[in-house]
Structure formats: C-alpha cells, structure tokens
Image (cartoon, rainbow, N blue to C red):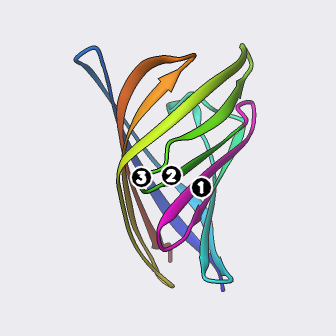
C-alpha cells in the first residue's frame, strides 16, 4: 500500500494570548508498515520550513513527527509523557519539551485524522500552547 494523498495541516498556536493560525494543504505519500501509518510530505513557504520533508509515524496511541532538511527535528507525542527533543534550524539548535494533553488518532488504510493539543517549552521557558489537526485523504 503506497498511496498518493492530500494532507491538510491546520495549526493553531497561542503565545501570550496572541493566536496564530496556519493551514497547509499539500500532496503527500501514505503507506502502512507493521501496523504503523506513515505520511510523507514536503513543507512549503507557508509553514516557514521550505526545503524540509516531514514524515509522520502514526500508531494507535502515539505520533512521531520527523522533519529533515532546512529544519531537522523529531517530536514525539505520547499520552501523558513529556518528551524532550532538539530542534535544529538554520539559526541554531533549540531544546523543545512537548507536553501533550490531547492525542486523538482516527486512522485507517484510506487515511484519517489526527488531533494533537500540547504545551511547548523552548529553552526551559513555556513558549506556547498548540493545536494540530491533520487530515489525510486519497487524491484521485
């Protein structure tokens, strides 16, 4: 199973009561390997990470977001587990702490949805509260 899909990523970020919304709709690749779904797509100028490829590994209870290119990181979203990762940008490396409070996964062999809500700390300081809503469906 290796399908061409459309990936919609809606991101909402709250920083000091300021809300920023970004929506990205892009073609991608979708496949399943050992009960894990994979979604691969290229970031665009809209996300501010042009030149980066994002791979999402979606299991039944966790999501791994892996970016490689101009921005390199691996973010792990697991229920009830704070995760520390390094976020490598063209401007330097930052330590990020992901503190998820909602992980809602509804995936099948045709695509599906992932909803994530989490707190983000950067450099030891609370940086933002974030929501990600990812939809994947087959392109024809």
Q: CA distance from mark 2 to mark 1?
A: 6 Å
Residue 15: x and y in percent read 33, 19
For the residue carrying disc 2, how many other residues have a C-alpha within 10 Å: few (<14), some (14-19), or many (20+)? many
For numbered disc 2, what is the local secondary structure?
Answer: strand
Residue at image position (74%, 19%) is 90
Secondary structure mainly formed by the magenta segment: strand
Report which residue position mark 3 lands on.
Answer: 80
User: Which sits in the foreground, 130 or 50?
Assistant: 130
Residue at image position (40%, 45%) is 100
Looking at the rendered image, the disc whose residue lies closer to the viewer, 3 or 2, is 3
**Span of residues in magenta:** 56-72
Residue 64 painted magenta = yes
Report which residue position mark 2 lands on.
Answer: 77
Residue 14: x and y in percent read 30, 25
Residue 21 painted magenta = no
Residue at image position (56%, 27%) is 48
Please indicate whether residue 105 sits to the left or right of residue 91 in the image: left
Quadrant of the rendered image containing residue 18? top left
Q: CA distance from mark 3 to mark 2?
A: 9 Å
Please indicate whether residue 127 sits to the left or right of residue 109 in the image: left
Quadrant of the rendered image containing residue 107? bottom left
Q: Earlier in the sequence, mark 2 or mark 1?
A: 1
Q: Which mark is residue 64?
A: 1
Residue 29: x and y in percent read 64, 67
Residue at image position (69%, 31%) is 86
Task: Reply above or below: 92 against 37.
Answer: above
Task: Reply above or below: 33 against 126.
Answer: below
């Amino acid at each position: 199973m290796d399908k061409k899909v459309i990936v919609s990523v809606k991101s909402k970020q709250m920083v000091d009561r300021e809300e920023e919304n970004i929506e990205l709709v892009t073609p991608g690749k979708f496949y399943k390997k050992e009960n894990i779904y994979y979604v691969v797509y290229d970031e665009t100028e809209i996300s501010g990470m042009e030149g980066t490829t994002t791979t999402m590994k979606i299991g039944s209870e966790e999501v791994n977001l892996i970016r490689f290119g101009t921005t390199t990181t691996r973010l792990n979203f697991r229920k009830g587990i704070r995760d520390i990762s390094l976020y490598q940008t063209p401007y330097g490396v930052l330590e990020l702490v992901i503190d998820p409070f909602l992980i809602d996964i509804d995936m099948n062999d045709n695509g599906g949805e992932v909803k994530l809500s989490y707190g983000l700390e950067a450099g030891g300081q609370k940086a933002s509260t974030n929501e990600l809503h990812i939809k994947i469906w087959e392109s024809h």
